[in-house]
Structure formats: structure tokens, C-alpha cells
Amino acid sequence: MLFFCGNTMCAGKHSLDTSVIPVDNITTVTIQDCLADKLFISKNPDQEYSKSIEYWNYDTIMIADFKNDLLAGNLAFALETVSSIRIKQREKGTFEWRTIYDIPIQKEEDLAFKRTYPYARSKTTYEFAVLPVLNNKVEGNVNITECYSEFAADYLIERDNMVQMILNIKYEQTRNQNSDVVTTLGRKYPIYVCNGSANYDSGSFEVTFISLDTATCTFDVNDGINYRNQIDDFLTNKKKEIYKTSNGDMWLINVVDNIPRNIDEQKNPVHTVSWVETGGYNSTTDMYMANLLDVDYENL
């Protein structure tokens, strides 16, 4: 005669084991009616039993030592193995990652951080990678997420300032190269001469600068003159800026020449701003030299 106990035949190795019961993701743990020195939870069911489990690995979910607290995470372990959190960025479909932030980690509070990246092009999908770093060299596991960037206005951006341009926007650009055409005696066609590797954009834009209250989506017309005077100071501060448009164009520029202000047919004041491209927004070094990123990782 055969007897079954649990899910195995009588006298089997696991005959007294309880039946396997499928469960959903476990989100809570309750300990009661006992004295507990330690709580250890792992995703690895084959891990050998031990009365002393002092280490973390990728299967560990929590270790609670009950040292007058309910801490069960790996913050202490993380602080020993992480010196900074590095954030990288790239346009989706490209291969090269660009480091945009490196956040020092010295205490638990440093792991709670927030960063904003204002230099994204419109109509572009970006990938962002967050990874731990040890001693500024050894990078850990990468967590990648993506987002789509799109906006309706044009912007001028410095490190701590951003100007939104909405009304009466017109702009033009020119691709510049250092070249010339030489005609000579005895030749039907001229000679094309290109000296140097200059290849950059320049241009100008017209816009009515006006302050927008984002809470009410209304323009502050009454304080317009003071706002435009502040804009004039912003445009003539000699700093490099990111200029980006709603259709996806973007440049690292300097404002050049005088900045005239005219009145159009609708009595709106219109600025005309000339600019020249003086760096690459995809170059970490150029962005660092423009004081738009913190560290020049291309030349570490």
C-alpha cells in the first residue's frame, strides 16, 4: 500500500514538507509572539541555512538586526561601496553616453537627491542611466530609463537662468565655413580653396520678451518694461548660453553685436538678437567650459 503525505510518497525525503502554494509578490512581513535576533529574506531558495548572515548579495531583499530600530535595508553596505552616483545621458539610437552629473555620496541623506536636466532638445527621445561609482572609477550596475522631450517655446539657458520666448518668434541661421573661390588665367573653372576646419552656425532671432505667469498662463504686461531691461542685462552678460527652439534645433552660443529693440505694427516691442555658435552642446568639455556642467569627464 502507498501513502502520500504532503506532495511526496511516504518515506520520501520531503514527505513531511507542506504542499507548495503559489503566492503573489510578498509586500509585508509580520513577526509576532517571539524574540527575534535577526530577520533575513532572500530571493534565493537554495541558499544554505546559517545562524550568522552578515553579507548582502543581489538576491538579498532585507537583513534586519533589530538594534533598537527596524532598519533592514542596505544603506550601510551601500555607503561602504559607493562614493558617488553618476548620471549619464544620450539621445536614443546613439551609442556614446555623456556624464551630466556626478553626485558625491558620504552619508545616507546624500542618496535622496533630485536633479533637473534643462539642456534637452525638443522632439527628441533621451535615455538616462543612473549607476553607482566607487572611487570615481569603478562603475556598478546600470539602471536605464527613457523620456521624450518636447516643448512649444524657444529658450535661452544659462546655468542658473532660463528665458522663455513665446511671442513673435522669427529666427534664421547660417552655416559658416572658411572657404574661397579663385579664378585664374587659362582655366575654365575656378579653384575652390578651403583653409582651416571652421564649420559653425551663426544667426539671429526676433522675439517679444514678456514674462509669463505659469500658474495662470497669463502675460505680465504691466511690468513689461522692467522685465525687458532685465533681459537686456541677461543678453549682454558675455556668458555662453544654450539656445534651443521648439522644432528641435539647439546650439551653444554667445550673443554678439548690438541688440536693437523696435516696435512692430501691433505696438509690441521686438528684440533682434545676433548670435554665433561657440561650442558643441554634445561636448562635455565645451559644456564644462561654459559653466553648464560640473565636471569635465572627457579630460579626467
Image (cartoon, rainbow, N blue to C red):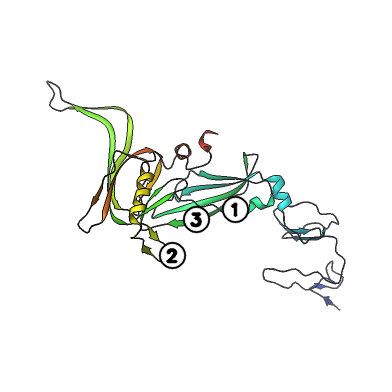
Kindly give the residue lying farthest to the bottom in the view shown.
1
Asked which secondary structure carries label 3, the reply is strand
Residue at 47% from the left image edge and 40% from the top image edge? 291
Neighbourhood count class around disc 2 (C-alpha, 10 Å): few under 14, some 14–19, many 20 upward: few
Q: Looking at the picture, which amino acid does disc 2 mark?
A: Ala
* Foreground disc of the pair 2, 1: 2
Kindly give the residue lying farthest to the top in the view shown.
185
Left or right for 97, reference 37: left
Q: Mark 1 points at which residue?
A: 113
Q: Report, in whole angstroms, how far the alpha carbon at label 2 lies from the one at label 3.
A: 28 Å
* Foreground disc of the pair 2, 3: 2
Q: Looking at the picture, which amino acid does disc 1 mark?
A: Phe
Q: Mark 3 points at which residue?
A: 146
Q: Name the residue under label 2.
A: 215
Q: Report, in whole angstroms, how far the alpha carbon at label 2 lies from the one at label 1.
A: 25 Å
Q: In which quarter of the image is the C terminus?
A: top right
Counting from the top left corner in percent of width and height, residue 166 is at 33, 57
Q: Looking at the picture, which amino acid does disc 3 mark?
A: Glu
Asked which secondary structure carries label 1, the reply is loop
Q: Report, in whole angstroms, how far the alpha carbon at label 3 lies from the one at label 1.
A: 19 Å
Q: In which quarter of the image is the N terminus?
A: bottom right
Residue at 54% from the left image edge and 45% from the top image edge? 101
Counting from the top left corner in percent of width and height, residue 29 is at 75, 68
**Of marks 2 and 3, which one's residue comes earlier in the chain?**
3
Residue at 36% from the left image edge and 56% from the top image edge? 153
* Foreground disc of the pair 3, 1: 1
**Of marks 3 and 1, which one's residue comes earlier in the chain?**
1
**Of marks 2 and 1, which one's residue comes earlier in the chain?**
1
Q: Compared with residue 11, is residue 258 higher up or lower down, i.e. above or below?
A: above
